[in-house]
Image (cartoon, rainbow, N blue to C red):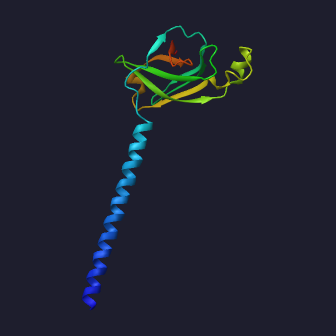
Amino acid sequence: MKSKYHKLRISSKFSLDTIFIIMIMLSLLLTYSFFRAWNRPSLSLPHIESYTLKTAHIDSCVFSDKDITVIGWAFTEGNTRILNRIFSKGKNGDWIELMSSTITRGDVSAAFNSPTIYDRSGFIATRKDSSVKESFNRDIMIISFDDKGAGHAAKYHCQ
């Protein structure tokens, strides 16, 4: 009787270990897939309606040995929904998207005499890369989208 119990115990332990390993592998795979989905580099520029974005400004543009940081604001006039994407030009000619976050800029709304409409026009865009100086020139493109989804762009060369 003891041998049947012992075999059953070993069999159930093996099953639990197998299930545990499969669950760990699935959790790692899901974590990795979410990371890749959210941090996917943009392979191409979005459609740009015009290169006449006049309501944009770069406050700070820093290219160091290992990262790029761009701070500024942009919007398309008359739009209440503000969406900006920032790109940096590689030395091979490709435009690489910088990861950007919205920052509150009450000064922009005040300057355009539009209380709180353009408060969300600010951005900080960054990219960490071990070869920034070798891979990127100092050209920046800001693309601000209007309510219809059309992109309006402005190009800058950082000093």
Q: In the image, what residue occupies the spot 69% across and 19% down?
A: 108
Any part of residue 61 in sight: yes
> Relative to residue 97, is residue 58 drawn left or right?
right
Taking depth in this image into account, of 36 and 146 the one nearest to the observer is 146
Q: Position of residue 119 (x, y in %)?
A: 68, 24
Taking depth in this image into account, of 38 and 127 the one nearest to the observer is 38
Any part of residue 157 in sight: no
> Relative to residue 60, is residue 109 drawn left or right?
right
Q: Position of residue 126 (x, y in %)?
A: 51, 29
Q: In the image, what residue occupies the spot 51% across and 23% down?
A: 85
Taking depth in this image into account, of 75 and 129 the one nearest to the observer is 75
> Relative to residue 133, is residue 84 drawn left or right?
right
Considering only vertical position in the picture, is 13 above or below 109?
below
**Quarter occupied by residue 134:** top left
Instruction: List the single residue furthest toward the bottom.
Output: 1
Considering only vertical position in the picture, is 11 above or below 145?
below
Q: In the image, what residue occupies the spot 40% across and 30% down?
A: 41
**Quarter occupied by residue 106:** top right
Q: Position of residue 130 (x, y in %)?
A: 40, 32
Considering only vertical position in the picture, is 102 above or below 35?
above
Q: How many marks?
A: 0
Quarter of the picture containing the N terminus is bottom left
